[in-house]
Image (cartoon, rainbow, N blue to C red):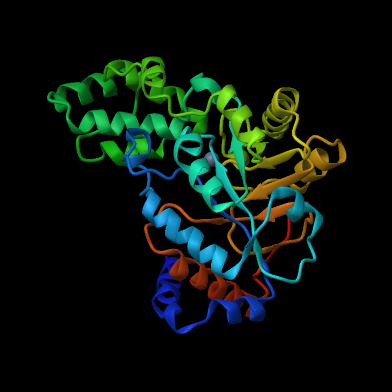
Amino acid sequence: MIKNGLINFLRFISPIFSEKKLIAKSNQVIFLPFYHCISNTNHEYIKNLYPVRNEKIFINDLDFFTHYFKPVDLDFLLNNKTVKEPVFHLSFDDGLSDVYNVIAPILLKKGIPASFFVNTDFIDNKDLFFRYKASIIIEKFKNYTKKELLIKKINKNISLHLSVNNFNTIIKSIDYNNKHILDKIAVLIDIDFNEYLQTNKPYLTTKQINELIKKGFTIGSHSMSHPEYRTIKYIDQIKQTTESMKFITDNFKPKHKIFSFPFTDYNVSLDFFNYIYKNNIVDYSFATAGLKIDNLNKNFQRFAMDGTLIPADKLVKAEYLYFLFKKIFNKNVIYH
Ligand SMILES: [Zn+2]
């Protein structure tokens, strides 16, 4: 709460600062913004989770980035960690079809490279991220006519203590380890996720990924099924990473084996990082802690651009101010 208040304050005062001076003062010339989705359509599978930036906001974001930073591809980023001029490398998690339909055409027009991290269980619309299932269930419930009857039916079958008032909160709080509950509720509320996947095709297909690679974009793994790593066993963290990375390597033959943590790398053990690097499972990893220095030189921290509709200049300046603030207390470095 204190952090949110501080960030809101920093966003409020950000217009009086110059981005150039903030970059120089912080000495953070590598900026790594990441997104999930850019869309003018309010997708059912995201709309109840967080606000999605539309094409107009995205284009403004890109204009801001290119004004202060030079766009670089993955190869440049990995080979120039001591670069002097400000650079940015864009990435997108979750492998949504909007990457192919909306994002890539805009980036190609502007000549901006990017990396796309995909969940191997979801490619070709084989399955759906559990958080997206929650959003679809909430959407269906909104217009459900016999709400009380349905709640009774769900509570009888699953011990959730749902009510009409707490429905959205409880559905959204179901985590990876309980995701089977969402499938049970879907049956009771009359949603067929397979049919949903085939009709709406939220994910990239193998063919689309190959086309994106041909156009110069890079592909990495975002795990198999998007668990929050700190909540699953070490052996499952290794399995999710190894098998998804192998799938990407076998199918798309990338030059660098890159992996982005689903949700966060917070509380993931140093043993895990050592294991994936030493055994050449992953060359470089990417996480989501914002503008921070990472004590592991193969792990990059990125800044989340979505979840808010605030313009890039305010968001990014506030993030630099926040970095400088944390630096006073030596909190600007992550030690794993
Ligand atoms: Zn993700």
Describe residue 143's horizontal placement relative to residue 88 as left or right.
left
Vertical relation: 87 (above or below) 74: below
Residue 228, image x, y percentages: 57, 39
Please, which residue is most extreme toward the front here? Answer: 109
Identify which residue is drawn at 67% across, 56% down.
72
Judged from this view, the residue extending furthest toward the bottom is: 16
Residue at left 71%, top 35%? 234
Residue 38: where, in percent of width, then height? 43, 45
Q: Quadrant of residue 219?
A: top right
Residue visible at 77% across and 66% down? 83
Residue drawn where x is 45% and y is 78% of the image:
14
Q: Foreground: 50 or 206?
A: 206
Residue 161 appears anywhere in the view: no
Q: Residue furthest right?
A: 278
Question: Which quadrant: the C terminus?
Answer: bottom right
- Measuring from the top left, give residue 82's x and y in whole percent: 80, 66
Query: Would residue 224 be found to the left or right of residue 269 on screen?
Result: left
Residue sitting nearer the eye, 321 or 198: 198
Residue 236 in which image quadrant: top right
Q: Could you say where residue 330 lies in the image, as x and y percent from the top left? A: 68, 74
Residue 153 in sight: yes
Q: Is residue 305 above or below residue 39?
A: below
Q: Quadrant of the N terminus?
A: bottom left
Number of numbered tags placed on the structure image? 0
In this picture, is 266 found above or below 182? below
